[in-house]
């Protein structure tokens, strides 16, 4: 979680820093990023391809050398097997080794002249063979150096015990020294020369041990590339026997500088013998090596070629540096070209920016001319149009403010004159009360309330409570004219009385019903009612004003709504006998609709519905705003 939070903070900081850069800087950064990504990918895959090519070439080259050395070893194995087979199948040799009695002089001379000479010829014909030795189990056999010995001289040697376990089959044994059977008797020191021995037990008859055949070859002749004297710091061959002993040259060896390499080669050889898997890559002390192996199944050993990759890695590093240098040079060149081109392309944009800064500082806008098209030219054109519109709106606002102040002063002046009218109405009211004319007194009270409501300057918005009181005063005054008074029925929750409404927005609708809902003439409708109801839906307020008058025909209703919603000045001709005259009413409703649209927005307004001969209803929609300060609609939060 902490890592994710730190990542988010880092990204936010980078986004903020990046957002404050100039457009030219961001464009250059985008160019570099767009180019850098493909360059890095191409460089990465090119480097991998080159690296794989170098490694593959090194593996192929050294594998070939390894196969050539393996071929030489197989030839040496064949020579040793042939020598051992010839000695093993010689009947005179077997008879001599199996002799349980001491031979006489004639037998010794005959064996030495024939069989022994043949054994010497076998060794002389194979100069790479170091020794051909036969060991007899019989204590009566005469030893003929350096070929025939009694077993008692070597019976304790590990290699002899290994040969005995072969039960007449070929057994291969590796030795680190070339020891002589008579060395303990004549004071000889074993030669520190590794060798390989081919051992085969002799049994006559089967199961009756009589002796052992041994064919020795020095490893420097058996595998000359493993013990080469040529100075080579790039590769080194190892011969690994079945006991995981390593045999190799001592000069220019990798082992002194890599103490773990011996164990690594032995472990990988053991794993290869068990699973057939071989890991070619090896690293120690920061250096890379390739371990290439080939099995020597005939002698239960493996030949491993260790190749140093220092020279190859040096070539690869040089190639990598060339690729990186080429990429850097290419990116620098692209950056310089992009900077020059962007400076030329964004020249007009900077001019437009400077013009905007001057306007923000309050300087007069004198216009800007940008040649050519494109997005910058279009932006400059629209900016000029915008500034002209702003200047026009500012002039209109100043004019409107001046007119508003003038109207306010005129209203204040009218209020001064209204005091005289209020006093006069009060005097008349007193006279009506003295004369016990209560109807006239009440009508004068209502009329005074209407005058005060009209003359009082309190802004465009009032409480619904004040507008309803004004309508009640209006109905009281108008009922003086009628034999059957109009009844005002209110269905308004107390909480809605604090709602904000436009001043004089409901009164024209009620006045429209009073004038046009009921037909004129001598007879009047006995039951006249006007219902005012307030409902709420989706944070909006719906006020409906409904009368029980004669209603409108569908044609007249459609024409009336069209006149209300029409943007042009209406030409309403709806008056007619018995048809419900709505000409003046249509103009009044249109004025109310336009005021609602002006002050609350296009989502609000009013609608007229009617049923012929039964009723007409005007529905008004406005946002829910409490004039006391509470606001349940975000768009009208600062009204009142």
Image: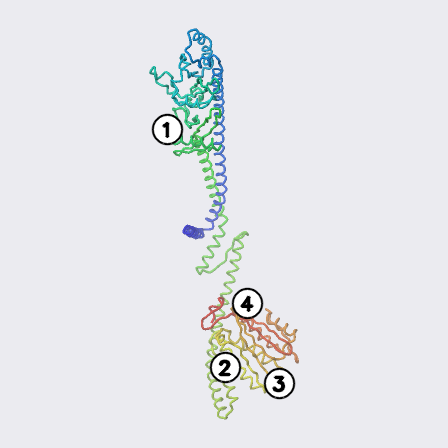
Tell me what residue is drawn at x 40 percent, y 17 percent: 151
Q: Position of 100 compared to 554: left or right?
A: left
Q: Position of residue 553 (x, y in %)?
A: 65, 75
User: Which circle, 1 or 3, is nearer the viewer?
Assistant: 1
Give the mark nearest the N terminus, 1 or 4: 1
How packed mark 2 is, by other alpha carbons closer than 10 Å (few <14, some 14-19, many 20 or more), is some
Circles 1 and 2: CB atoms closer than 8 Å? no
Give the mark nearest the N terminus, 3 or 4: 3
Helix, strand or loop status at disc 3: loop
Frontmost residue, 210 versus 497: 210
Give the residue at mark 1: 256
Give the residue at mark 4: 603
Give the mark nearest the N terminus, 3 or 2: 2
Mark 3 vs mark 2, CA separation in Å: 28 Å
Q: Outermost residue, bottom direction?
A: 435
Give the mark nearest the N terminus, 1 or 2: 1
Helix, strand or loop status at disc 4: loop
Q: Which numbered marker is on residue 451? A: 2
Q: Position of residue 638 (x, y in %)?
A: 46, 68
Q: Position of residue 523 (x, y in %)?
A: 63, 86
Mark 1 vs mark 4, CA separation in Å: 91 Å
Q: Outermost residue, left direction?
A: 187
Mark 1 vs mark 3, CA separation in Å: 129 Å
How packed mark 1 is, by other alpha carbons closer than 10 Å (few <14, some 14-19, many 20 or more), is few
Give the residue at mark 3: 524
């Amino acid at each position: 979680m902490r890592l994710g939070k730190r990542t988010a903070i880092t990204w936010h900081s980078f986004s903020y820093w990046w957002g404050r850069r100039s457009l030219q800087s961001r464009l250059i950064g985008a160019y570099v990023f767009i180019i850098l990504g493909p360059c890095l990918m191409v460089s990465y895959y090119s480097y991998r391809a080159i690296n794989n090519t170098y490694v593959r070439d090194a593996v192929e080259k050294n594998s070939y050398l390894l196969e050539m050395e393996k071929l030489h070893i197989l030839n040496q194995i064949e020579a040793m097997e042939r020598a051992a087979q010839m000695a093993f199948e010689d009947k005179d040799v077997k008879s001599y080794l199996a002799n349980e009695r001491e031979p006489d002089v004639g037998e010794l001379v005959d064996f030495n002249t024939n069989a022994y000479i043949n054994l010497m010829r076998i060794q002389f014909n194979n100069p790479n063979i170091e020794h051909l030795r036969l060991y007899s189990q019989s204590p009566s056999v005469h030893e003929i150096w350096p070929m025939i010995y009694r077993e008692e001289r070597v019976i304790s040697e590990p290699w002899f015990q290994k040969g005995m376990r072969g039960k007449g089959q070929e057994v291969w044994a590796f030795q680190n020294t070339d020891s002589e059977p008579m060395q303990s008797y004549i004071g000889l020191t074993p030669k520190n020369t590794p060798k390989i021995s081919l051992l085969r037990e002799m049994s006559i008859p089967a199961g009756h041990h009589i002796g052992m055949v041994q064919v020795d070859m020095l490893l420097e002749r058996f595998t000359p590339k493993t013990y080469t004297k040529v100075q080579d710091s790039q590769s080194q061959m190892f011969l690994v026997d079945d006991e995981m002993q390593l045999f190799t040259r001592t000069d220019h060896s990798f082992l002194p500088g890599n103490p773990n390499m011996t164990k690594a080669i032995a472990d990988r050889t053991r794993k290869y013998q068990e699973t057939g898997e071989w890991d070619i890559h090896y690293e120690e002390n920061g250096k890379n090596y390739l371990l290439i192996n080939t099995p020597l199944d005939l002698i239960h050993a493996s030949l491993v070629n260790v190749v140093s990759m220092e020279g190859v890695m040096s070539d690869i590093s040089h190639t990598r540096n060339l690729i990186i240098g080429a990429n850097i040079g290419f990116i620098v060149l692209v950056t310089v070209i992009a900077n020059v081109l962007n400076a030329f392309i964004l020249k007009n944009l900077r001019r437009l920016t400077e013009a905007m800064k001057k306007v923000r500082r309050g300087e007069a806008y004198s216009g800007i001319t940008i040649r050519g098209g494109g997005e910058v030219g279009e932006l400059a054109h629209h900016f000029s149009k915008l500034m002209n519109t702003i200047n026009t709106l500012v002039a209109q606002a100043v004019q409107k403010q001046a007119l508003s102040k003038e109207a306010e002063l005129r209203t204040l002046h009218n209020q001064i004159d209204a005091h005289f009218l209020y006093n006069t109405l009060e005097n008349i009211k007193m006279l009506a009360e003295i004369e016990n004319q209560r109807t006239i007194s009440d009508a004068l009270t209502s009329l005074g309330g209407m005058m005060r409501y009209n003359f009082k300057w309190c802004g465009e918005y009032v409480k619904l409570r004040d507008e309803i009181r004004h309508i009640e005063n209006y109905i009281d005054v108008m009922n003086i004219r009628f034999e059957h008074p109009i009844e005002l029925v209110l269905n308004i929750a107390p909480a809605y009385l604090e709602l904000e409404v436009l001043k004089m927005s409901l009164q024209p609708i009620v006045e429209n019903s009073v004038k046009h809902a009921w037909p004129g003439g001598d007879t009047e409708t006995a039951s006249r009612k006007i219902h005012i109801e307030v409902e709420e839906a989706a944070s909006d307020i719906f006020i409906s004003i409904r009368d029980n008058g004669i209603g409108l025909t569908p044609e007249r209703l459609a024409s009336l709504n069209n006149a209300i919603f029409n943007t042009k000045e209406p030409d309403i001709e709806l008056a007619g006998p018995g048809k419900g005259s709505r000409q003046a009413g249509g103009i009044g409703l249109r004025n109310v609709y336009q005021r609602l649209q002006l002050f609350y927005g296009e989502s609000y307004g009013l609608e007229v519905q009617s049923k012929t001969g039964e009723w007409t209803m005007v529905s008004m929609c406005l946002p829910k705003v409490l004039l006391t300060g509470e606001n349940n609609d975000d768009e009208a939060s600062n009204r009142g």
